[in-house]
Amino acid sequence: MKDRDLEAEFERIVAGWETEAPDPHGSSVPPSPPPDPSAGAESAPGEASGPAGTPTPAEGRFKDTGLNLPIAPAAGHVWRGSEPPREDVDELLDAGAVDDDHFVPPTETDLPTAEEDPMFWAIVGGLGGGTLLLLYILFFDRGGSGWWIVTAVTMIVVGFVLLVLRGGTERDPFDDGTRV
């Protein structure tokens, strides 16, 4: 763009600076009243001002809109914040709430004894004990026998194999592939 065209475009923008952008939502909130010229807002000496001491648009100033931000007159500004809560939602939620049907947690189940379920305790001993033994060797007994490492890894592998075998091989005939 040529300098002359650039300056003409700048003058056009500055001339339309005081016009306000239309409200895209059609808000019924009236715009804030202009400041009272008799409030004593005097312009500094040597500063050009328009009627009643307000700065002219040619000085490159903008109208105080409360946020002190310039707003282009042709830009559609859309507020993208959350909507205020609706009051009828609470009424609908209260109307649909039934206090009789509330969640009752299942009763606590105790861990099985070693006589009832020895495989469970073999899995816990293999996975938990093997891991703890391996950590003990790693942190406290690095110069010890290599057989301790073999024992720890064997315990972990045996615990994992027992865990897989405990899962069972029968499938639910009504299972549609979503299994937890």
Image (cartoon, grey):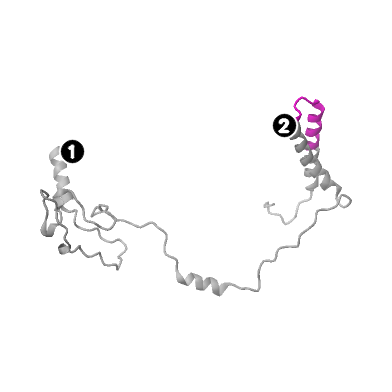
Name the main secondary structure of what is drawn in magenta.
helix
Quarter location, residue 135: top right
Identify the residue at image location x=16%, y=41%. 6
Identify the residue at image location x=63%, y=73%. 99
Task: Provide residue 90's location: percent of width, then percent of height.
Answer: 50, 71
User: The residue tagged with tag 1: helix, strand or loop?
Assistant: loop
Neighbour class for label 2 at 10 Å: few (<14), some, many (≥20)?
few
Residue furthest to the right in view is 115
| Res. 139 mark | 2
Identify the residue at image location x=40%, y=57%. 81
Identify the residue at image location x=23%, y=56%. 64
The answer to whether residue 28 is above or below residue 78 is below
| Res. 145 mark | none
What type is the residue that disc 1 sits on?
A: Met
The Cα atoms of the two marked residues, 1 and 2, are separated by 73 Å
User: The residue tagged with tag 2: helix, strand or loop?
Assistant: helix
Q: Residue 155: within the magenta?
A: yes
What type is the residue that disc 2 sits on?
A: Phe
In front here: 163 or 141?
141
Task: Provide residue 118's location: percent of width, then percent of height.
Answer: 86, 47
Range covered by the magenta-colored residues: 138-157
Task: Provide residue 113's location: percent of width, then percent of height.
Answer: 85, 52
In front here: 119 or 145?
145
User: In the rendered view, does 95 fall on the left or right side of 33?
Assistant: right
The answer to whether residue 110 is above or below residue 101 is above
Give the mark toward the camera: 1 or 2.
2
Q: Earlier in the sequence, mark 1 or mark 2?
A: 1
Q: What residue did someone put label 1 on?
A: 1
